Amino acid sequence: MRTNFRRIHFTLQFVFHCLLAGVCAAAAAEVGMNPELSTYIEAIGKPRLEKLTERVYVARAYGGSNFLFIIGDGGVIAIDSSWHIGSAAQALADLRKITDKPITTVIYSHGHPDHTGGVRAFIPDGAEDRIPIYASAKWHRYQDELITPIQPMILRRGAKQFDLDRVFDGDIMVSLGRFPAEGAIVSYLPPSREIDGPTELTIEGVRFVFEPHATDIDDALLIRLPDENVVYAGDAVTDMFPFIETPRMETGRSAEGFVTAPGIIAGWKPDHLVMGHGNTIIGDPDRIQRILRVQRDAVRE
């Protein structure tokens, strides 16, 4: 099994670097962008940490996806890690302006590489045994899928879906947010702690509620911080029409989950909602409830 994980790590890095090399070689002349998409991307803004509560900060616009830092009693818990090591390291450097507490725990909201690829910025070589990684107990299936014969098809279609074959002002991945077209190194470490069913844990003095719920992928977790009234939805909720299917035709995606997940989150009545991509809703519970209803009804209908 350990050999498989080495293969996964190598494969993700190799294929991603090949894609980037192709992008940079093919895009001597940069292409234009749909004005509406340009407006959306510009609204995401520059890389920054947004404060939700005294403990919770969301990392925005560092590299294709959002992720969280939660400052605990003795250390920092990171939920997700962006797509690549450089963007996660940049966010961590900004966090050091707020706290010098070390990263002591990592949580994967789900296994897609745009949420796990920066993990080596948080867990350096040799620290694997002392920094646990929590994830859904269903994480194995997707990681095994990455080393099957269907992987090249998934990656080719993913490159088209996310505009990896285009460059805009030196950046790629504009459909999810910008990140540099050069120097992106993707990492991966397997989880060491599995969450199998609804679970409540206290980590570094911070209470967490985990609800495994298939949506974007079958190893997805909905994550609630009840004392902070924060919910991290991962890719289960989005501020645009949800991606209930993709050109990648990956297994494990659940259209039904995109209908039922908003109801679970709505029942938690959060004040703050962080989504894996797009905007963060801070201190506006009424807007959160509206977005959840819209997604539920749009997918259901």
Image (tube, helix red, strand yellow):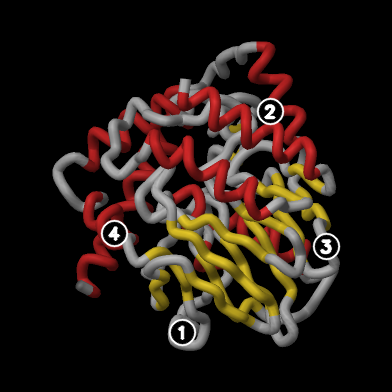
Disc on res. 8: 4
In the displayed image of the protein, which residue is found farthest to the front? Answer: 267
Question: What amino acid is at disc 2?
Answer: Ile
User: Which of marks 1 and 4 precedes in the sequence?
Assistant: 4
Question: Which residue is rendered at x = 67% and y = 33% of the image?
Answer: 291
Q: Nearer the viewer, residue 247 or 283?
A: 283
Q: CA distance from mark 3 to mark 2?
A: 25 Å
Secondary structure beneath label 1: loop
Q: Residue 126 has which mark?
A: 1
Tag 2 residue: 41
Give the class, few, some or many, for how many residues have Cα within 10 Å of label 3's Cα (few <14, many ≥20).
Answer: some
Quadrant holding the N terminus: bottom left
Give the label, 1 or 3, closer to the camera.
3
Q: Identify residue for label 3.
A: 53
Q: Give the distance between the C-alpha atoms of the residues marked 2 and 4, in whole angstroms.
A: 31 Å
Q: Secondary structure at mark 3?
A: loop
Q: Amino acid at mark 1?
A: Gly
